[in-house]
Image: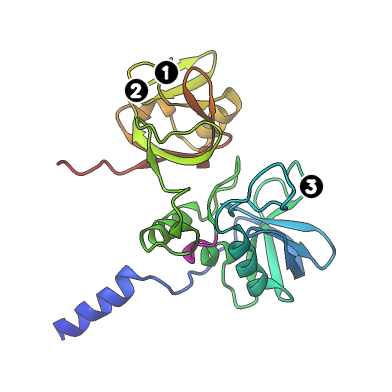
Amino acid sequence: MLRILAILFLILGTHPLAAQPFDPASLKACGSTVAGEAISGARFKSAEGQTVKIALVKAPELWAPDAAYKSWPYGPEAKAALDARIRGKIVTLYCEGPSTNRLGELVAHVVMENGDWLALDLVREGHVFVFPGAIRRHGLTTLFQEEEGARNDRRGLWRFSNLDPVEAQSEAVNPGWFQIIRGQVQDVSIVRGTYYINFGEDWRTDFTIEIPPLVARQFAKQSVDPMSLKGERVEGRGWVDFKSGPRLLVQGPGQLRQLPALPSP
């Protein structure tokens, strides 16, 4: 009997592949539609011609061959995976916060006819990664857990190294790139309402995560005090630029999360 239980633990505990139910009770219904073609790994056209952006996730960027920007690894594969999954299918949309973004796209949690949460399946299979907007957070913890499993198993986009987490105090931090950066916070300061989360002894040259006043108010609404992050190990994700050293300017609380401490050597 113990042997059977151990086998079940190995099968179910390390590979939680069963879809988890999506609870939309706190969200606003945004209607149903028949999905058209995928535009990227995280966007598709509705039957009405509206572009739908799947909430909480980002796909590897996909650009035309003559564009000024270069497509990311796995971009075409992510688009093909979404297209195969949704084209011609009836989907139900749920909105959290504003229904549209600055591009006029409908940003929604997408639920398939069988009740599957589309973002969860795409993250689990490694076709997209977690990247919340400024205010959307419904189910975010679950998505981060599934992303970790996909990364560890090197599924989909995680077969490539461009999105592998890098350490804040390493030379791998690269301004001009989208990165996932982890490290232990050395100090947190606030100047005229802006929080600066510093990872090195010299803020003038070391990597910093910046939280502007508007975003700081969003942290406060979620009862998160950036000052409490001093000494903690955290992760930030987004575009890195340069301002007195490499900087990640966060646009919402979901771009920054606390991680477990590293085990002692």
- Residue 240 on the magenta span: no
From the viewer's side, name the closer residue of 254 and 51: 51
Residue that appears at 36% across and 30% down:
229
Which residues are drawn in magenta? 123-127
Q: As displayed, is residue 144 above or below residue 86?
A: above
The secondary structure type at the circle numbered 1 is loop
Q: Name the residue carrying label 1.
A: 205
Answer yes or no: do the residues labelled 1 and 2 have beta carbons within 8 Å? yes
N-terminal label among 1 and 2:
2
Q: Main secondary structure of the magenta part?
A: loop
Coordinates of residue 41 in the picture (x, y in percent): 63, 60
Mark linked to residue 104? 3
N-terminal label among 3 and 1:
3
Coordinates of residue 183 in the picture (x, y in percent): 34, 35
From the viewer's side, name the closer residue of 79 and 140: 79
Amino acid type shown at disc 3: Gly
Coordinates of residue 104 in the picture (x, y in percent): 79, 47
